[in-house]
Image (cartoon, rainbow, N blue to C red):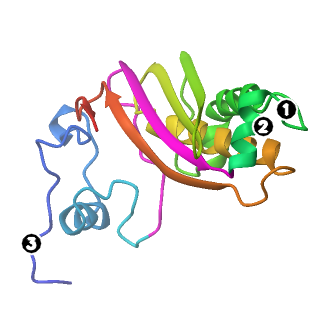
Amino acid sequence: MSDRPEAQPDPSDPWVTPPEQGGAEASPAEAAATAEAPGLTHVRADGSAHMVDVSAKAVTAREASAAGRVLLSADAVAALRSGNVPKGDALAVARIAGIQAVKRTPELIPLAHPIAVHGVEVDVTVADDGADITATVRTADRTGIEMEALTAVSVAALALIDMVKAVDKHGRITDVRVTAKSGGRSGDWHE
C-alpha cells in the first residue's frame, strides 16, 4: 500500500460519469493512468494500448481533410499528363484506391474505430515534380475521421506509384498530413 491518496477521476472530464450518476468508480490503475498520463487516452496504466470507448460521446457531423505528394521523374509526369502510363489511367486508379481505403481504415489502423463514412472526395493533380493528392472525408459519428482522410491520401499515393513504376521506379511519397478538421469536442482547425 502506498501512502499517497488514491487518485480520483476528474469530474470535468467528459469521458467520466460520476458514480452518483451511475458511472463506475475508476480503478486505482485507471485513476493512476489518468493522473500520470493526461491526454494519452489510448494507453492503459500498464502502458498497453487499448481502443477508447466512445459510446458516451454525442454523434456530431465531422469532416477531415488530408494532403500529400508523390514526387516523380519528369518522364513519369509527362506520361501522366499525356495519358500514356503503360498500366492505364493512373489518376483514376489512385482516386478509387483512396476512396476504397477510407472504408478499410479500421482494418489497417489498429485503434481506429469503425465509423460510418458519409462522403469521400479524393483528388489527384499532376504537378511539375509529381502529383498532389487531397482527400476530404465526412461522417456523422462519435469520433473523428482524420485517420480515414490520411489513409485515403496514403493509399492513393501508393496506387499512383504502382501505376507509374514502369516509368519511374523511384517515386517518393512525402508530406502526408491532416490539413483541416471540423466537428467534435476539439473544434475546427486548418493549416
Residue 108, image x, y percentages? 65, 48
Report whether 154 appears left or right of 39. right
- Residue 106 location, quadrant: top right
Q: What element carries label 1?
A: loop
Question: Of label 2 and label 1, which has the lower sequence position?
Answer: 2
Looking at the rendering, the stretch of residues picked out in magenta corresponds to 48-73
- Residue 36 location, quadrant: bottom left
Alpha carbons under labels 2 and 1: distance apart: 5 Å
Alpha carbons under labels 1 and 3: distance apart: 70 Å
Alpha carbons under labels 3 and 2: distance apart: 68 Å
Marks 1,3: beta carbons within 8 A: no
Residue to which mark 2 is pinned: 79
Residue to which mark 3 is pinned: 5
Residue to which mark 1 is pinned: 84
Question: Of label 3 and label 2, which has the lower sequence position?
Answer: 3
From the viewer's side, name the closer residue of 71 and 57. 71
Name which residue type carries label 2: Ala
Q: Is mark 2 on a helix, strand or loop?
A: helix
Residue 117 in sight: no
Name which residue type carries label 3: Pro
Name which residue type carries label 1: Asn
State the quadrant of the C terminus. Answer: top left
Marks 2,1: beta carbons within 8 A: yes
Q: Mark 3 Cα within 10 Å, few/some/many (few <14, many 20+)? A: few
Query: Vertical placement of 179 versus 40: above or below?
Result: above
Q: Mark 2 Cα within 10 Å, few/some/many (few <14, many 20+)? A: some
Q: What element carries label 3?
A: loop
From the viewer's side, name the closer residue of 175 and 76. 76
Report whether 101 appears left or right of 26. right
- Residue 123 location, quadrant: top right
Question: Of label 1 and label 3, which has the lower sequence position?
Answer: 3
